[in-house]
Image: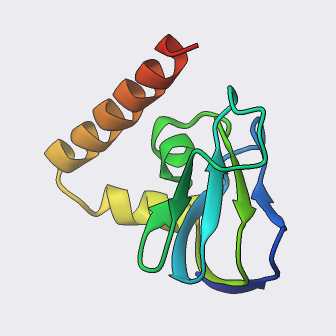
């Protein structure tokens, strides 16, 4: 795990990037911009003690959205390898649920287009 301090207006990741890990917001706000968003306003905000970037890691696909800091942020980055180790140590049912949820969310988002 690695702690990241980021200034306002910085990309955490962009749509299409490899999903190399999961982020936890320790402080601040990160805006999530879905592909259909052509505005400067995020579709939703991720705030203190919330995770983001998990869908690509769980489903092993590239990033489907762009994450941009809306305020100064203190983030905790959990690499794909660290995350995979955590999942591998969990029960098989938990692993299956994670993969199903990620795929359903991805399908729901692409159906909106």
Residue drawn at 56 percent across, 54 percent down = 53
Residue 86 x/y as whole percent = 37, 66
Instruction: Say above or below: 16 vs 6.
Output: above
Residue 95 x/y as whole percent = 27, 45
**Drawn side of residue 86 relative to residue 42, left or right:** left
Residue drawn at 63 percent across, 66 percent down = 30
Residue drawn at 62 percent across, 51 percent down = 32
The way the protein has been coloured in the rendering is: rainbow
Instruction: Say above or below: 42 vs 68.
Output: above
Residue drawn at 64 percent across, 36 percent down = 34
Quarter residue 1 falls in: bottom right
Instruction: Say above or below: 9 vs 91.
Output: below
Residue 11 x/y as whole percent = 81, 61
The quadrant of the image that shows the C terminus is top right
Quarter residue 73 falls in: bottom right
**Drawn side of residue 82 relative to residue 17, left or right:** left
Q: Nearer the viewer, residue 14 or 80?
A: 14
Residue 103 x/y as whole percent = 40, 27
Q: Nearer the viewer, residue 13 or 20?
A: 13
Q: How many marks?
A: 0
């Amino acid at each position: 795990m690695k702690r990241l301090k980021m200034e306002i207006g910085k990309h955490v990741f962009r749509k299409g990037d490899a999903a190399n890990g999961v982020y936890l917001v320790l402080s601040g706000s990160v805006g999530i911009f879905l592909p259909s968003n052509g505005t400067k306003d995020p579709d939703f905000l991720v705030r203190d003690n919330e995770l983001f970037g998990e869908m690509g890691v769980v489903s092993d696909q590239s990033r489907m959205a762009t994450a941009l800091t809306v305020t100064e942020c203190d983030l905790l980055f959990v690499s794909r390898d660290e995350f995979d180790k955590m999942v591998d140590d969990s029960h098989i049912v938990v692993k299956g649920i994670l993969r199903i949820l990620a795929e359903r969310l991805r399908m729901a988002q692409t159906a909106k287009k």
